[in-house]
Amino acid sequence: MNQNTGDQKRRRMTLNDVAALAGVSAVTVSRALRRPEMVSEDLRQRIDAAVAELGYIPNQLASALASSRTHRIGVIVPSLTNGLFGDLLRAVHDVFLPAGFQVLVLNSGYVAGREEKAIATMLGQHPEALIVTGIDQTEASRRMLEQAAIPVVQTMELADTPIDINIGLSQREAGYAATKFLIDLGHREIGQISVPLDARARQRLVGYHRAIAEAGLKPMTTSIERASSFPLGAQLFGELHERHPAMTAVFAGNDNLALGALFECHRRGIRVPEDMSIIGFNDLEFSETAYPSLTTVATPRYEIGLKSAEVLMEIIRGSGRRPREARIDLGFRLVERQSTAPPGASVPIP
């Protein structure tokens, strides 16, 4: 009877093991796995049966490196729990998985040093192309990406000097548009709450200040360096409202904060939108089903991921041509719903 002991180690099956079981040479096994159409049906079935019985996993990276085609695409995002980046990742997977690629994902956690390490780790996996979030990479990160000799796409924001290809939207202009929308409704006491861990959130804040300055109004802001959440939105709104009780509108740096602010308004007996207008950012799924539904700025997250993947696919498996413009602006859209109205308006909500 065979018994496992502490001295015995499990051994990974090799190409030679498959060849021995199938009764063929290792070269034939390699050919059958890489180009199955080059061997007979009977031989292919014998080799497939041996692979299944032994649980053999081909060393795809070794053979891929020899041909410089690893069938790997790298993606680096700042969060794996934020649904915002789930839309981008879904689009990337929709393009690359059917084409036989692996999509490798690393999380930088909104920390520049962690992003540097993530880029170094990802490049060590020899991806054929890399997608990164944002444009605020450190000098060390930019240097690695510029010297990687693979296509690189920076996403979610627009850069004046892209590393290679840049696909996104102007976060600054979107923040300006959200604030200008409240000003055009007649609001003059407009607050802003944000979590500036995210460089894109900081750009929205720049847009807010620009709109406020153009209108000759006084800025009213509060922020905290923590991950965005509903409770944090409630906390920030409460702090800002206590400092500025005359405030009639608030621009939340994202929809999570906006929904938290809405909850806090309900708790304090502040009517939305009669007493307080709230506008969010990103148009996450819950924005439409909140009560009242949230006015917000819709960002094309899936479309950014889709365009990034399509551009990269064209470069690495198509014509090899890069897009005519290195910077591609997919824009944004303001979605007006029930949470905003002119100050003091009587707005019946069904």
Image (tube, rainbow, N blue to C red):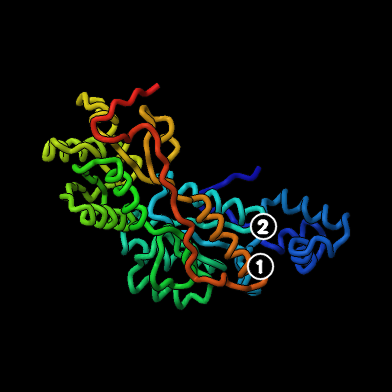
- Please report the residue visible at 44 percent of the width from the left and 52 percent of the height from the top: 332
Residue 160 point in image, percent of width and height:
38, 71
Taking the image as drawn, is residue 347 in sight?
yes
- Please report the residue visible at 24 percent of the width from the left and 45 percent of the height from the top: 193
Residue 278 point in image, percent of width and height:
29, 37
Q: Label 1 crowding class (10 Å Cα cut-off): few <14, some 14-19, many 20+?
A: few
Taking the image as drawn, is residue 123 in sight?
no
- Please report the residue visible at 15 percent of the width from the left and 39 percent of the height from the top: 239
Q: Which mark is residue 99?
A: 2
Q: Label 2 crowding class (10 Å Cα cut-off): few <14, some 14-19, many 20+?
A: few
**Left/right of residue 252 with respect to residue 89 in the rendered view:** left
**Structural distance between the alpha carbons of marks 2 and 1:** 10 Å
**Left/right of residue 172 with respect to residue 42 in the rendered view:** left
* Residue 275, quarter of the rendered image: top left
Residue 222 point in image, percent of width and height:
18, 47
- Please report the residue visible at 57 percent of the width from the left and 59 percent of the height from the top: 309
Residue 3 point in image, percent of width and height:
60, 44
Q: Nearer the viewer, residue 350 or 326?
A: 350
Q: Nearer the viewer, residue 67 or 150?
A: 150
Q: Which mark is residue 35?
A: none
* Residue 61, quarter of the rendered image: bottom right
Sequence-earlier tag: 2 or 1: 2
Residue 178, compared with residue 114, is above or below; it is: above
Indicate the amino acid at tag 2.
Answer: Ala
* Residue 162, quarter of the rendered image: bottom left
Secondary element type, mark 1: helix
Is the Cβ of the residue at disc 2 closer than 8 Å to that at disc 1?
yes
**Left/right of residue 188 with respect to residue 56 in the rendered view:** left
Q: Which residue is mark 1?
A: 317
